[in-house]
Amino acid sequence: MTQQAVKTESTAPVLQIQKGANEYKQQLLTLTNTAWQIAYTALWNTLEFSAQEKKVVKEFIINFLHQSSKHKKAYNDFVQRVLLARQYVNTHPGTYIPLPSQWFSTQNKNGFIGTQKWLNTVQMYRASLPNYKQSLKAFAQAIEETTHSNSPADFHYWRNYFIEQNSQTLLNLFLSTVANINFSATN
C-alpha cells in the first residue's frame, strides 16, 4: 500500500511556483523603458516619435534584454552600444541615425546590429586595459541607480564621476537623460 502511494505521487504532475516572476517582468519593463530613454536622448533627443514608433522599439529592446539570462548585463551592453553609435556619429560628419524602428531593425546591418563589433573591440581592449572606455560602462549604471533610487546623493555621485573622468559629453548626456526620464510626459 505504501508503495502504491509513492508510485501515484511520482506520476502526478508537479506544480512549480516561480518566485519573483512578476518582479522579474517589472524589472525587465523598467530596464526597457530606461534603455529606450537613454537611446532616445543619445540619438534622437530633438525629435518626437509616435506611440507606434516607440512601441516597435520597446518591443525590440525587451526582446534583446530577454534573450540573455543576465538581463542587467544585456542592458549594460545595450547602453554601451548606443553610446558607441553616438560617438561614431559625433566624430564622423555626414553620418546620421535613421528612425529608431529602422535603426533597431534586425534587417539593418548598419544599425544597432552593427554596433556589436564595436562593443567586441572595446571588450577586447578591456582585457588588457581594464579601464578602457570605462565611462561608457558606468553610464548604464549611473542612469539606472540615479533614476531608480531618486536620491540626490546618487545624482551628485554620478555627476561628479563624469566630471572627474573629464567627460563633458557623457556628463551632458547623463543630465539630459535623467531630465527626460524624470520629466517627460510619456516614455
Image (cartoon, rainbow, N blue to C red):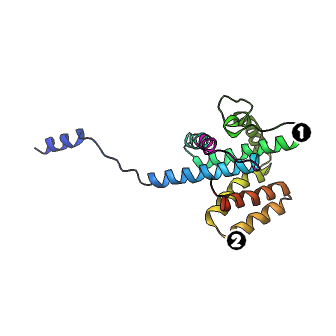
Q: Quadrant of residue 147?
A: bottom right
Residue 144 in the image: x percent, y percent?
A: 65, 58
Q: Quadrant of residue 89?
A: top right
Placement of 105 over or under 85, stated as above or below: above
Report helix, strand or loop for mark 1.
loop
Q: Is residue 6 magenta?
A: no
Q: Residue at x 57, y 44 (%)?
A: 62
The amino acid beneath tag 2 is Ala
Q: Quadrant of residue 94?
A: top right
Q: Nearer the viewer, residue 1 or 23?
A: 23
Placement of 102 over or under 147, stated as above or below: above
Residue 167 seen in render: no
Q: Nearer the viewer, residue 116 or 143?
A: 143
- Asked if labels 1 and 2 touch by Cβ distance under 8 angstroms, the answer is no
**Image quadrant containing the N terminus:** top left
Residue 169 in the image: x percent, y percent?
A: 83, 54
Placement of 183 over or under 47, stated as above or below: below
The amino acid beneath tag 1 is Pro
**According to the image, label 1 marks what residue?**
93
Checking the image for residue 153, the label placed there is 2
Judge depth for marks 2 and 1 and give the one in front: 1
Q: Is residue 22 left or right of residue 165?
A: left
Q: Residue at x 44, y 51 (%)?
A: 21
Q: Residue at x 63, y 41 (%)?
A: 53
Q: Is residue 144 left or right of residue 12?
A: right
Q: Residues within 10 Å of mark 2 (few under 14, many from 20)?
A: few
